[in-house]
Amino acid sequence: QVQLVESGGGLVQPGGSLRLSCAASGSISRLSSMGWYRQAPGKQRELVAGIKRSGSTNYANSVKDRFTISRDNAYKTVFLQMNSLKREDTAVYFCQARMIGSGVDYWGRGTQVTVSS
């Protein structure tokens, strides 16, 4: 079992920045990867960025060069630095963690990010 708690969301003006954090607890030594997803009203949940235990990362094309995913060495916290935010980045952002072997995914409850002037 893995528990995930997101924080850092809020209201920001276009062009601004936010940093999201995801605190993981439980069987974190058995995680193969963690990531950030988002879901806007009326849309499907989509991958924003992911980071493997090896440290390799991947990003959605829409956020490349603006967002950066990182983690601490213990894999207890994963961050999403979001710069140059756009209105279309408005969504609920969810932290996700995947277990080695079984591939079971765990999810946080999400944090709202609203980009508006």
Image (cartoon, grey):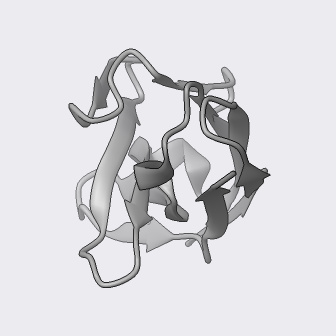
Answer whether residue 9 is visible to the viewer in this image. Answer: no
Q: Residue at x 69, y 51 (%)?
A: 117
Looking at the rendered image, the quarter that the N terminus falls into is: bottom right
Q: Residue at x 30, y 69 (%)?
A: 45
Left or right: where does residue 102 sit relative to residue 39? left
Query: Residue 44 placed where, x, y %?
Result: 24, 75
Q: In the displayed structure, would residue 46 be above or below residue 45?
A: above
Q: Residue at x 64, y 55 (%)?
A: 116
Identity of the residue furthest to the front in this view: 117
Kindly indicate the quadrant of the structure image that contains residue 49: top left
Kindly indicate the quadrant of the structure image that contains residue 113: bottom right
Identity of the residue furthest to the bottom in this view: 42
Answer whether residue 29 is visible to the viewer in this image. Answer: yes
Q: Residue at x 71, y 37 (%)?
A: 18
Kindly indicate the quadrant of the structure image that contains residue 98: bottom left
**61 and 13: which is toward the camera:** 13
Q: In the displayed structure, would residue 77 be above or below residue 66?
A: below
Query: Residue 13 placed where, x, y %?
Result: 70, 43
